[in-house]
Image: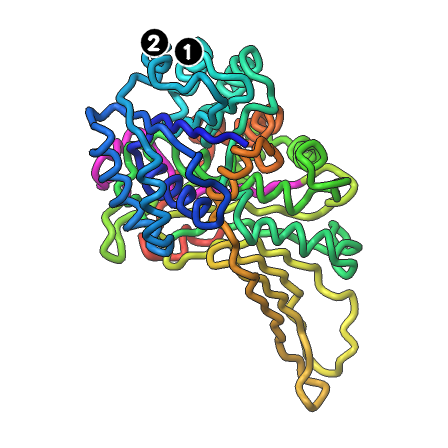
Amino acid sequence: MIQQLVILGATGDLTARYLLPALGALRTAGHIDERFGFTAVGREDWTDDAFRAWAADQLDRHAPDVPAERRRDIVTAARYRKADVTDPDALTAVLPHDQPVAAYLALPPSIFPATVTALYAAGTATGSTIVLEKPFGESLHDAIELNQLLSDRYPEQNVFRVDHFLAMATVLNLLGVRLANRVLEPIWNGTHIERVDIVWDESLALEGRAGYYDGVGALKDMLQNHLLQLLCLVAMEPPVSLGDRDLRDRKIDVLRSVRPLSLHDAAQRTRRARYAAGAGIPAYVDEQGVDPTHHTETFAEMLLELDNWRWPGTTFRLRTGKALRANRQEVAVHFRPVPHMPFHGDVTATPNVLRFGLEPESVSLHLTGTTTRGDVLTPLTLAATPEPADLPPYGRLLLDVLHGNPALSIRADEAEESWRVVTPVLDAWAKDLVPMEEYPAGSDGPAPR
C-alpha cells in the first residue's frame, strides 16, 4: 500500500470539498494510520502551518462528521510546498524519492501534459501512481495525445483516470441489483426495457465556478464522462468478475456499440440550453466571470441507441442541467407495457419503472396492483434505502489508488471511446446545427419538443 500522497493543485476546491474529507474518512475507518503522509503542492506562498490552518478549516466545514481527533491526524500529516507543477526541478525538490507516491493531479486538464512530463522528468519511485481528474483532455485529439504521453512514461496499471461517480454507493448497488437477482437479469434487454433515463438535474446554479465551467459546459462536464460511465454499467454484458480487466472490457464494449451520430442525427437527437433569469438567480450570461461569446450550455441532452444483441429498440436518454426547479439525480429503467390487459372497462396500467436514486441514495420499483375490488388498478411502490456507505466516493477512489486497484478507474481506450461518442455532438453544436435554447432558472428546463 502506498503511504505517501502528493496533491498537485492542493489549495483548490477539489481538495477542500472532497480530498481532505476523503482522507478523514479513510483515517476514521482505519485504512490509513500514522505512517501515512501527504504533500500539498500549490502556487500560494504558504508555510506548513498556513496550509494546515486552511486544511483544518476546510475539514471543519466539509467533514464535520469526521471525529475531531481524526481531522487533526490528517492536518498533522500534511506538509506544504510551493512549486510550479510544470517544472521538473521544482517537482524534484518536493517529491519523496525513497518510496512510491500517489501523485494526484487536482489541476485543469489543459496542464495535464506538462505536469505529467515534469513528474516523469523529476523521477517518481517504482510503484508510484498518477491520478488524473476528469475531464480527461478537452477533445478526442487531446485524449489520444495524453494517452500516448502517459503510455510512453508509465505502465497503464499505474495510471488512474478517476471518476467519483463510479464509487457512489448506489452506482455500485446498481450492479448488485442487476447482476445478483435472477428476477431481473433475464428481462434486462431491449425486449422488455423501452428506455433508460440517466439524469443529473441540479437546482444549484453556477455557484462561483465560472473559471472552470464557462470553458467546459454541461456536455463535457457531465455527459462525456459521468453519465456515459453510468450508461456503461446499466447496459454492459455481465462480466466474468468485477476485476479491473473484466469490468473495463465490458464497459468498453458498450461505448463501442453506441450508434455513431451523424451531424443530422446530432441535430435531431441532442439539445442544449442555458438558463435565463428566474427564481432570484441571474441569467447565466450575467453571472460573474462568464463570457457570453463562449456560448456555454448549462443544459445538455442526448438520445443514444446501442447496436448490439441486448438493446435493439431501447433509447438511452442522458440529461443534465443546472438551475432547475428540483434536484433529480437518478437512473430510471422504464419497462415496456404489458402486451394484453385482461381487466374489464377502460383501464390502463402505468409501465413499470425501476429507479436508482443517486443523491440521495435509494432504490424503488414502481408496479401496478388492484384495489380490494380487484378491477380497479392502482400504483404500488416497493422502496428501499441502501445501507450507508462506509466511505464517501472520493474515499473509495483514494483507497483503490493507494492499494493499486484500478477497477473503478477509466482505461485509456475507454477515455478515447467516450470522446468518440460526443465528438459529433460537439461538431454539430459548433456549426450551430442545434439551437441554443433558454429556460428560466427555477423551471423544469427547456419546454418539451
Task: Look at the picture and state if 105 lies above or below 150.
Answer: below
- Asked where in the image residue 82 lies, by quadrant, the reply is top left
Point 79% across, 69% down: residue: 340
Q: Secondary structure at mark 2?
A: helix
Q: The magenta stretch spans which residues?
A: 284-305
Q: Amino acid at mark 1?
A: Ala
Q: Tell me, yes or no, if residue 259 can be seen here.
A: no
Point 41% across, 50% down: residue: 446
Quarter that holds the N terminus: top right
The local crowd at label 2, few if under 14, some if 14 to 19, many if 20 or more residues have their Cα within 10 Å, is some
Residue lying at the far bottom of the rendered structure: 373
| Viewer-side residue, 107 vs 436 | 107
| Viewer-side residue, 241 vs 434 | 241
Q: Which residue is label 2 attached to?
A: 89
The local crowd at label 1, few if under 14, some if 14 to 19, many if 20 or more residues have their Cα within 10 Å, is some
Residue lying at the far front of the rendered structure: 34
Marking on residue 122: 1
Q: Amino acid at mark 2?
A: Asp
- Asked where in the image residue 302 lies, by quadrant, the reply is top right
Check if residue 297 falls in the magenta segment.
yes
Q: Could you tell whether 195 is left or right of 276 in the image?
A: right
Residue 448's spot in the image, x, y percent?
47, 53
Point 55% across, 37% down: residue: 400
Image mark count: 2
Q: Tell me, yes or no, if residue 38 can be seen here.
A: yes
Circles 2 and 1: CB atoms closer than 8 Å: yes
